[in-house]
């Protein structure tokens, strides 16, 4: 499985930095295109999914429509959002808007833990409910894990 991580390499664990787009390309535009299209999985933050790096390769991009050269279009069949119960709805909409051809959405999270962090008191009512929670409130039942994979056993009891 070929995975590529977008974003600032400094925010990636040192033992995984080799898998960042920056480490693989040294910002060579031809290498960026080749590596993105060879990847089976593209990993980014929700906001990073809508960043300038992917924009030229998305069918929704105005730069793609105006570009005189034909730029290949990245197609994503699945969008997976980790910690979705802590993300605001607008954050979750960014990867969905960039992956218009996606046929599956997987939201991973625990609505019983922290809600989205919204510092503005005025915005908290509008943004304080995650997409995960809103879908659950609308009747979509989550699939719960029967086994905890990430939590240390001492605090999992």
Image (cartoon, rainbow, N blue to C red):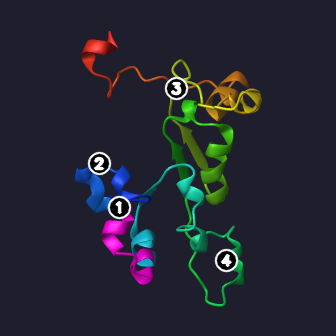
Based on the picture, tell me whether residue 128 belongs to the magenta stretch. Answer: no
Relative image position of residue 118 (x, y in whole percent) = 64, 32
Residue labelled with disc 4: 63
> In this view, which residue lies farthest toward the bottom?
68
Residue labelled with disc 1: 20
Q: Quadrant of the N terminus?
A: bottom left
- Crowding near pointer 4: few (<14 within 10 Å), some, many (20+)? some
Determine whether, in the image, residue 110 is placed left or right of residue 116.
Answer: left
Relative image position of residue 121 (x, y in whole percent) = 72, 27
Which stretch did the figure color magenta?
20-32
As drawn, 84 above or below 78 = above
- Crowding near pointer 2: few (<14 within 10 Å), some, many (20+)? few
Magenta stretch prevailing secondary structure: helix
Residue labelled with disc 2: 13
Going from the N terminus, do you reach mark 4 or mark 2 first? 2
Relative image position of residue 53 (x, y in whole percent) = 52, 68
Relative image position of residue 117 (x, y in whole percent) = 59, 31
- Whole-angstrom CA distance, mark 1 to mark 3, is 31 Å
- Crowding near pointer 1: few (<14 within 10 Å), some, many (20+)? many
- Residue 90 placement: quadrant: top right
Do labels 4 and 2 touch, CB within 8 Å? no
Going from the N terminus, do you reach mark 1 or mark 3 first? 1
Residue labelled with disc 3: 143
Residue 77 makes an appearance in the image: no
Camera-side residue of 113 and 102: 113
- Secondary element type, mark 2: loop
The residue located at (40%, 80%) in the rendering is 28
Residue 85 makes an appearance in the image: yes
Going from the N terminus, do you reach mark 4 or mark 3 first? 4
Do labels 2 and 3 touch, CB within 8 Å? no
């Amino acid at each position: 499985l070929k995975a590529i991580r977008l974003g600032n390499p400094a925010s990636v664990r040192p033992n995984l930095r080799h898998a960042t787009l920056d480490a693989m390309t040294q910002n060579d535009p031809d290498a960026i295109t080749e590596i993105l299209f060879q990847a089976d999985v593209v990993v980014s933050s929700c906001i990073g999914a809508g960043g300038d790096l992917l924009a030229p390769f998305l069918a929704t991009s105005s730069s793609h429509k105006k570009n005189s050269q034909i730029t290949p279009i990245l197609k994503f069949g699945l969008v997976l959002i980790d910690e979705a119960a802590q993300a605001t709805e607008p954050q979750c909409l960014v990867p969905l808007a960039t992956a218009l051809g996606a046929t599956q959405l997987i939201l991973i999270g625990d609505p019983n833990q922290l809600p989205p962090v919204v510092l503005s008191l005025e915005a908290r009512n509008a943004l304080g409910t995650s997409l995960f929670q809103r879908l659950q409130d609308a009747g979509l039942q989550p699939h719960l894990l029967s086994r905890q994979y990430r939590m240390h056993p001492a605090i999992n009891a």
